[in-house]
Image (spheres, rainbow, N blue to C red):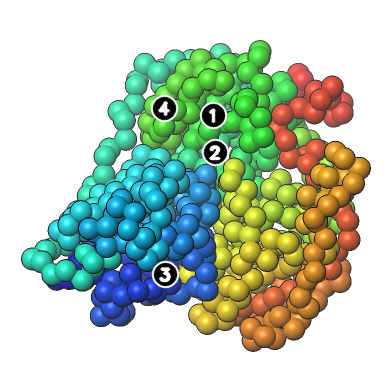
Amino acid sequence: MTGGQALVAQLLKQDVEAIFLIPGVQLDWAVDALREQNSRISVYVPRHEQATTYMADGYARISGTPGVAMVVPGPGVLNACAGMATAYASNSPVFMIAAQIRSGGVGKAYGLLHEIKDQSRLLKSVTKWNALAQKVEDIPKLVARGFSAATEGRRRPVAVEIPHDLFEVKAEMRARRPRSGVSAPVLDERAIDEAAALLDSARLPVIYVGGGVMTGDACEQLYRLARRMHVPVVMSDNARGALPDQDPLAFTTLAGRVVFERADVVLVAGSRFMDSLVIQPSWPVDGKRYIHINIDAADFAAPRQPSVSILGDAGAALGLLAQKVKPRQVCSADALTRTKQWAEQEVDKVIPQNAYIRAMRRALPETGIFVNELTQVGYLARVAWPVSAPRTYIGPGYQGTLGYGYPTAIGAAIAAKGRPVLAISGDGGLGWNMQELATARKYELPVILVVFNDGYFGNVRALQRRQFGAEIGVELKNPDFEHLARAFDLAFQRAESPETLGEAIARGVARGGPTLIEAPVGEMPSPWPLLRLQPMAGSGAASHMNPNPFALE
């Protein structure tokens, strides 16, 4: 086989069904090998290399299996690194195949086409594991090893670099049996027993979960433990859907403020549990005892202060705890209901954002997928969008990558195999990847894009005004979005109100295929006071909720 054929043979062995790439001269022999297997691997070609990894990320988050991207060296890799950084922040198993310059020139600074000084070091900064093939026979084993690294333990992106001359070289090779991966650390039974005893003795224990519960398929075990004690489960942005929001025990981080104020023991599962803006835990450690469950020991480190640390698989640990803790009714149905009602009332005050969110949620089927972006409506959606099932909500993680949403939604739609996908964007963020409207049309994907158009980088403008009383560099000159949709041969609608937006989405769902909807908006109130898990300066987290329904629990 050629190196290109060996690569494709190994991808098939890994059960890869789709790959996102843009052809280029350093990929010719690999792309031709994909042509030979085009009945077994679908090739999706976006219009910008940045979109290859975003699409692979969306595919991975919905399918639960690695999303594969392939790019040329140098500028191709640099363009794709934004998607790798987002995947890293979101614990998403993206597999990048990065071409390299000719093998004899790596590190020699000859000025070969697409050469950059140290591509391997660059990739190391946005991956869990990366490797460079030295000879053609390395290709199958490195691909197999990369898939194992992406999916074992903490799921994160990986990269394999292949000098482009190796794609062309022939050698006797076979695809390797997929590596089984390294088993999760054996759970420390004593730590499990300590955690169970601490939960049993707590007056008001609370469970806080992060994306690791989702990627580790631990939702069922989480449900059993929460039900066993009848305690609230506070879900981070990455964990939305771990419990359906309709469940009385399912809390957003906004509702979570109320229980955190009174909690004495907090079980943190599958989360970094760090504030995204300052160097401190997501919630103050004073006066509380913490139990941390994580596959990555680094997430036990200071400034977090766990009383009990459980290294291992979240599902296994939560399942054991569900067997060991004493069954009891910690929280009354009244306290749970009142807290969730308080959070809903707080969200309802943020208008018009929540009116748009409610209209969009009504129009999107329960099985549909929502891709949230960095826009004023999207910020509030972190705590206001009802999520009914795992893998139906996608956010950007702590990387906060503006413009990631639409190409990520395209990858999600490919993985979802016909289920509708709703992506939202501001008019500023859309500028990063509006060319991917052509990709949605090319593959006739059921992705509905709503652009909230205020003519500004709205959040930046609001921050500048609050901090400096003035603004600069935030005004936008936008295209006519109706003409833009026509240019890409997309269905278009303009929605002047939340009600007409809901109707437009419903029509887009019924129609199938890609739709662009423009929602003209003005300045909106800041949703940020509802988003920070930390208590606001000068007051308790829920001090304006009087009395706290958990005060007497």
Front residue of 282/125: it is: 125
Name the residue tied to disc 3: 21
SS for callout 2: loop
Q: Which residue is drawn at 80% across and 56% down?
A: 474
* Marks 1 & 2, CB-CB < 8 Å contact: yes
**Real-space Cα separation, disc 2 to disc 3, in angstroms:** 31 Å
Q: Which of disc 4 and disc 2 is earlier in sequence?
A: 2
Name the residue tied to disc 4: 297
Image disc number at residue 287: none
Name the residue tied to disc 2: 210
Judge from the rendering whether residue 457 lies leftward or rightward of residue 245; answer left or right: right
Judge from the rendering whether residue 144 lies leftward or rightward of residue 234; answer left or right: left
SS for callout 4: helix
**Real-space Cα separation, disc 2 to disc 4, in angstroms:** 15 Å
Q: Which residue is drawn at 59% across and 31% down?
A: 274
The residue mark sitting in front, 1 or 4, is: 4
Q: Where is residue 281 in the image (x, y as percent from the top left)?
A: 61, 26
